[in-house]
Amino acid sequence: GAVVSQHPSWVICKSGTSVKIECRSLDFQATTMFWYRQFPKQSLMLMATSNEGSKATYEQGVEKDKFLINHASLTLSTLTVTSAHPEDSSFYICSADTLAGTLQETQYFGPGTRLLVL
Amino acid sequence: KNQVEQSPQSLIILEGKNCTLQCNYTVSPFSNLRWYKQDTGRGPVSLTIMTFSENTKSNGRYTATLDADTKQSSLHITASQLSDSASYICVVSPPSYKLIFGSGTRLLVRP
């Protein structure tokens, strides 16, 4: 099956620093990748949709200047949390789309990155 | 408004027992309906995916059903194991690519 990896799996940083999270599709090419945020005991919330070679589309309420997304290739997307603050502490999950345009289109999720901002 | 509602919110069962999780949705039209299993601190893992024309789909001890007329889906777990303890999320995919997530059912399987 399709495998999506994330790096790092967890990160602790000081308030004001920037953190980069990588999302890779290991055995398939993904034209579209998605970034989600999940708070404890809540469901995933879509932050942005990332298409290879173009600007990401952000959901309402998500600051694009704070959460920088780069989708440089068909297998890699990065999320950079700039000037992180404690309220940015969360579980960040990416997903990559496959079989796009078909009824079997599905998203495969990465294992997540837990961010703790002190 | 497109919504996906799951019940129960949480469930505790004994190891070896069966259980059924429910999902009601108002999303229309939709491309497919999926069930995911999410272990604590991990990303969701796909269990089943059904198009609107499918009624049932199995994956080992997991069997999902879909009734497009009543807009209901269920996930049946047979002979539960301790490793089944997780959150189970019903997700509906409209043609727009944006998945609509249910809030999940937290299942705890006790020895």
Image: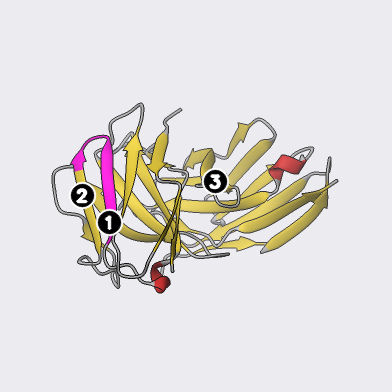
For the point 23% across and 35% down, which residue is it? A74
Q: What is the crowding at mark 1: few (fewer than 14 residues within 10 Å), some, or many (at least 20)?
A: some
* Percent x, y of residue A40: 55, 65
Tag 2: amino acid? Asn
Residue under label 2: A70
Residue under label 1: A80
Residue under label 3: B36
Sequence-first disc among 2 and 1:
2
Q: Chain of mark 2?
A: A
Callout 3: helix, strand or loop? strand
Q: Chain of mark 1?
A: A
Q: Say if residue A107 shows up in the picture.
A: no
Q: Are marks 3 and 2 in contact (CB under 8 Å)?
A: no
Q: Main secondary structure of the magenta part?
A: strand
* Percent x, y of residue A30: 28, 36
Q: Are marks 2 and 1 in contact (CB under 8 Å)?
A: yes
Q: Residue A48 vs residue B93: left or right?
A: left
For the point 49% across and 52% down, which residue is it? B91
* Percent x, y of residue B41: 55, 52
For the point 13% across and 48% down, which residue is it? A54
Tag 3: amino acid? Tyr
- Read off the magenta span: A72-81
* Percent x, y of residue A111: 47, 44
Give the total number of marks visible in the rendering.
3
Tag 1: amino acid? Thr
